[in-house]
């Protein structure tokens, strides 16, 4: 023991004889930079003269509970290195031994226990990182023109002294120095003990960390420790232990905690860290973190992390304030810290990738080697797609690459010019992209950009390497498309190019229910690779028996989205774009972009709406001849139980929905007197509760019936069962109750499948019936257009008004009448020359013609039998209306 104290005195004497750095100035510099916020004891920062004679040696501990340090540790590392520039001996201590217990500081729960192998591996990784940082710092010192002869930093592991010590020796020598009351007074200890308790291992952690400091003092004369603010308790214990053995005061310097935007400590424990290991955070991501700091953050972090002198620091920040757009502070900090952590090669790679992505130098991708390219693809979100999926629409590409969470956001962003493909701005969501645009970079990569800084990479896989689509995928389809046959259309031209035409053809499927699921599957398997599906409905339990693309886990989700995902998952070469909305919410340009529209609707009003939309897309020349390019075929199918029908509508050429509206069955109606007095079926009982009992009993207050509310359904079912029992009626079920309330038409999956089979090909005529209730019967008939159809005949439509009705009233009729539903009608008429009555689409004309809105038809000079011409944003052509104007005398009579 005497030999030990002799060696210690010699050690201290040798060090004290050297010219000692100014300890006070070094600490003051750290305080000015904001790197030291508090201290132990608390009075130290107000009395720095008390440490003037302290030996210039300082250490920090690093816990190997992970295989990498993080940005919070980097602040301590940088602060230590600045002390090193002031001439201090700095020590990096890796706590392999103490990590077996787990530091309770700043923890709400006990740490997960690590195996010895994990601790050893983590310790080696951290020591490697620290030694790499020290090597890289030598290059930074050269740039700082530092000529001081500095002591060599030390990287130590506390296992070196604990493996020679047994537990009895430790507690005999060290344990007697601690008092239980003082140990329990530590904040991190008392809070945990009063909540969920604490293990003895964690409780005794402070004794081992205190001994670490004692050991470093006895070997290096170290009386200064730097750590996070959560280490106050451990520093206090070390201070007490050194005072107990040597009657020396030790001091702790506490750096501020690095906090996330939510106020949480940034570190490995909370999963929000920026790691220092390149295997956890690449040099590019590390570089970008500092490059994208706000000006306020950059100002603060320059002081905390940079190594330049205070004069240079002030100059850099002044230059940054003068030209903030150049991001001088951010670039300086990103360069210096990336060099420190990732070396010159890591900094060069980070800059090269930054130039490629953000400085519009995408062709630099070709200069990246395989390893660097892997880093780029790993750090930038992306996806691998098959070249067989081409051509592909811009919005489908964006959704497949994960650029957007939903279709509506994608459409809005693309329309606003916020979507770029290989730096080319795309403003049309339906734009068809081919290999010419997508392969413009080397390595078969496509870089997608959202806004200015959000990037995604698409890697187009080669056919021979992807095993996604075999060359025989379209073998059977080619037989149909490359040769003629007895059932082929007379105008069909066999060609090897037909399969490619089908692949590029844009098809819209309306409805993702029973027919929609079959349609999507059959279209995808038939070679259609650019499909859109629109449906406003969500998945219900009753759908699962026939709508095979859905599973029980999908209940409550959008039918369109789930169906699209199911098809793409099963057939990855096919692009299916979902639209979760009403068909009325889409603009006219949306429907105009499709080559064919296939409808599997159960609503007559929806059929009439899409039919009216397609008729309004028709264009006619000056001679009244139809432009065939404006004709978009509508294939319409429907089922009811064991019955079904399918027809092809060629707007302007074949009968439209309005021509043969009587073909559609009227909605089921129950006579009120029957359901109230003489019910004869379970449907009558349910309808009675729905229409009469609900309004009388108000079971849920003033709430109206909600067909998707299970409580509402259950109440109606219970009441219907009671009423059915009173009249001796059987057959009331929950499923039937839902069907009556929601007006669900029962469907059979086999009927759906057969209808879609015919729906996918041109029928023999233009209307096909099918029913298999008592046997299989089918037939096709040729339907004729109604020459007087108000929608597609192009004959003037007669509208009847009172001569005292105003023009504004006429506009409202055109907007609200279910036959038209115009959005902003413009009205003109011929009176020698063309006169504008009201033109809201042109601001100048709108101002001039607005006063006409309050005038009556009589005041405007419009006569009975006169024709007016109406145009609207919802249609491509103009409709002619013949006015039937009634005089006051005619109205009275």
Image: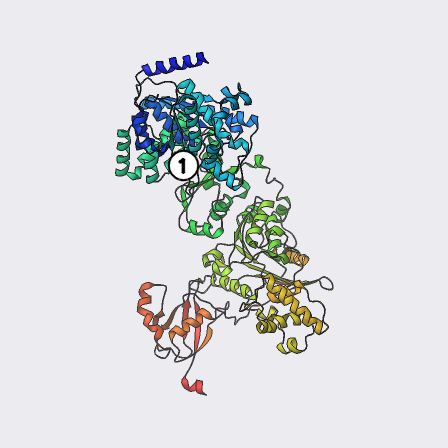
Q: Is residue 821 visible?
A: yes
Name the element at disc 1: loop
Check disc 1 and report the residue beneath it.
258
Q: Is residue 570 above or below residue 29?
A: below
Q: Is residue 332 left or right of residue 3?
A: left
User: From where the camera sits, is residue 367 visible?
Assistant: no
In the rendered image, residue 52, in percent from the top left (x then y), is placed at: 31, 24
Nearest to the observer: residue 688 or residue 167: 167
In this image, 556 relative to 423: left or right? right
Return the x and y of residue 340 as percentages of the image width and height: 39, 27
Residue at 62% of width from left, 77% of height from top?
672
Q: Nearer the viewer, residue 191 or 827?
A: 191
Outermost residue on the bottom side: it is 893
**What colour-coding does the image apply?**
rainbow
Q: Nearer the viewer, residue 137 or 14?
A: 14
Q: Residue at x 53, y 28 (%)?
A: 100
Indicate the quadrant where residue 753 lies.
bottom right
* Residue 245: % across, % down: 43, 22
Q: Residue at x 47, y 53 (%)?
A: 408
Residue 90 locus on image (x, y percent)? 39, 22
Decide: is 323 above or below 778. above
Q: Tell me the crowding category of disc 1: few under 14, some 14 to 19, or many 20 or more residues within 10 angstroms, Cα based.
A: some
878 and 487: which is toward the camera: 878
Q: Is residue 460 left or right of residue 675?
A: left
Q: Is residue 433 above or below residue 510?
A: above
Number of numbered labels in the structure image: 1
């Amino acid at each position: 023991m005497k030999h030990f104290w002799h060696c210690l005195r010699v050690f201290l004497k040798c060090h004290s004889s050297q010219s000692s750095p100014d300890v006070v100035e070094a600490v003051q510099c750290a305080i000015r930079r904001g790197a030291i916020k508090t201290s132990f004891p608390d009075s130290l920062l107000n009395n720095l003269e008390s440490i003037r004679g302290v030996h210039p040696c300082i250490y920090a501990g690093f816990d190997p509970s992970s295989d990498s340090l993080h940005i919070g540790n980097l602040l301590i590392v940088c602060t230590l290195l600045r002390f090193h520039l002031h001439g201090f001996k700095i020590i990096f201590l890796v706590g392999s031994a103490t990590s077996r217990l787990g530091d309770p500081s700043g923890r709400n729960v006990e740490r997960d226990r690590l195996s010895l192998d994990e601790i050893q591996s983590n310790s080696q990784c951290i020591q490697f990182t620290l030694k790499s940082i020290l090597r890289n710092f030598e290059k930074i010192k050269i740039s700082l023109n530092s000529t001081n002869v500095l002591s060599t930093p030390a990287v130590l592991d506390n296992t070196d002294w604990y493996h020679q010590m047994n537990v009895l020796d430790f507690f005999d020598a060290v344990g007697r120095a601690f008092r239980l009351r003082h140990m329990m007074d530590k904040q991190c200890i008392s809070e945990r003990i009063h909540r969920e308790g604490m293990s003895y291992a964690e409780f005794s952690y402070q004794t081992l960390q205190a001994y670490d400091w004692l050991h470093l003092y006895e070997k290096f004369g170290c009386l200064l420790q730097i750590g996070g603010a959560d280490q106050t308790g451990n520093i206090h214990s070390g201070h007490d232990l050194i005072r107990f053995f040597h009657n020396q005061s030790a001091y702790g310097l506490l750096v501020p905690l690095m906090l996330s935007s939510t106020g949480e400590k940034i570190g490995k424990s909370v999963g929000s860290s920026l790691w220092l290991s390149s295997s956890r955070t690449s040099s590019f991501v590390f570089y970008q973190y500092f490059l994208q700091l706000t000006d306020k953050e950059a100002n603060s972090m320059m002081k905390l992390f940079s190594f330049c002198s205070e004069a240079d620091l002030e100059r850099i920040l002044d230059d940054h304030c003068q030209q903030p757009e150049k991001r001088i502070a951010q670039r300086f900090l990103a360069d210096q810290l990336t060099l420190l952590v990732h070396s010159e090669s890591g900094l060069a790679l980070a800059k090269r990738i930054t130039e490629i992505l953000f400085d519009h130098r995408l062709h630099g991708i070709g200069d990246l080697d395989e390893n660097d390219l892997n880093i780029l693809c790993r750090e930038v979100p992306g996806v691998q797609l098959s070249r067989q999926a081409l051509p592909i629409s811009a919005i489908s590409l964006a959704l497949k690459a994960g650029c957007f969470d939903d279709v509506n956001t994608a459409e809005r962003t693309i329309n606003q010019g916020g979507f770029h493909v290989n730096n080319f701005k795309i403003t049309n969501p339906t734009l068809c992209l081919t290999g010419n645009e997508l392969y413009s970079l080397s390595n078969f990569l496509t870089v997608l950009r959202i806004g200015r800084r959000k990037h995604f990479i698409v890697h187009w896989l080669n056919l021979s390497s992807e095993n996604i689509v075999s060359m025989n995928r379209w073998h059977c389809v080619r037989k149909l498309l490359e040769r003629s046959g007895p059932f082929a259309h007379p105008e069909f031209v066999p060609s090897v190019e037909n399969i490619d035409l089908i692949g590029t053809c844009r098809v819209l499927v309306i409805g993702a229910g029973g027919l929609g699921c079959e349609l999507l599957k059959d279209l995808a398997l038939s070679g259609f690779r650019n499909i859109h599906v629109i449906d406003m409905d969500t998945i219900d339990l009753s759908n699962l028996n026939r709508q095979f693309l859905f599973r029980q886990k999908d209940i409550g989700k959008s039918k369109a989205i789930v169906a699209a995902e199911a098809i793409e998952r099963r057939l990855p070469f096919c692009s299916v774009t979902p639209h979760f909305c009403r068909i009325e919410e889409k603009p006219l340009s949306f429907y105009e972009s499709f080559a064919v529209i296939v409808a599997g609707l159960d609503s007559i009003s929806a059929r009439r709406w899409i039919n009216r939309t397609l008729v309004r897309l028709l264009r006619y020349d000056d001679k009244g001849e139809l432009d065939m390019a404006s004709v978009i075929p509508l294939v319409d199918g429907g089922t009811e139980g064991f019955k079904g029908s399918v027809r092809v509508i060629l707007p302007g050429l074949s009968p439209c929905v309005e021509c043969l509206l009587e073909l559609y069955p009227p909605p089921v109606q129950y006579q009120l007197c029957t359901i109230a007095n003489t019910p004869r079926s379970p449907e009558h009982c349910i309808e009675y509760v729905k229409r009469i009992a609900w309004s009388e009993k108000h079971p849920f207050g003033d709430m109206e019936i909600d067909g998707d509310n299970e409580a509402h359904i259950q109440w109606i079912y219970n009441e219907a069962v009671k009423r059915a029992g009173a009249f001796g009626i059987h057959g009331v079920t929950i499923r039937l109750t839902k069907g009556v309330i929601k007006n669900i038409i029962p469907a059979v999956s086999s009927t759906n499948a057969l209808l879609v089979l015919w729906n996918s090909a041109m029928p023999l005529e233009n209307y096909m019936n099918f029913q298999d209730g008592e046997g299989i019967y089918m037939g096709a008939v040729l339907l004729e257009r109604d020459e007087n159809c108000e929608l597609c005949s192009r004959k003037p439509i007669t509208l009847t008004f009172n001569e005292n009705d105003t023009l504004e009233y006429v506009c409202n009729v055109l907007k609200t009448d279910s036959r038209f539903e115009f959005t902003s009608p413009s009205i003109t008429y011929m009176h020698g020359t063309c006169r504008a009555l009201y033109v809201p689409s042109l601001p100048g004309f709108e101002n001039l013609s607005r006063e006409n809105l309050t005038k009556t038809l009589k005041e405007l000079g419009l006569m009975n039998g006169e024709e007016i011409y109406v145009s609207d944003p919802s249609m491509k052509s103009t409709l002619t209306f013949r006015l039937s104007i009634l005089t006051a005398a005619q109205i009275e009579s």
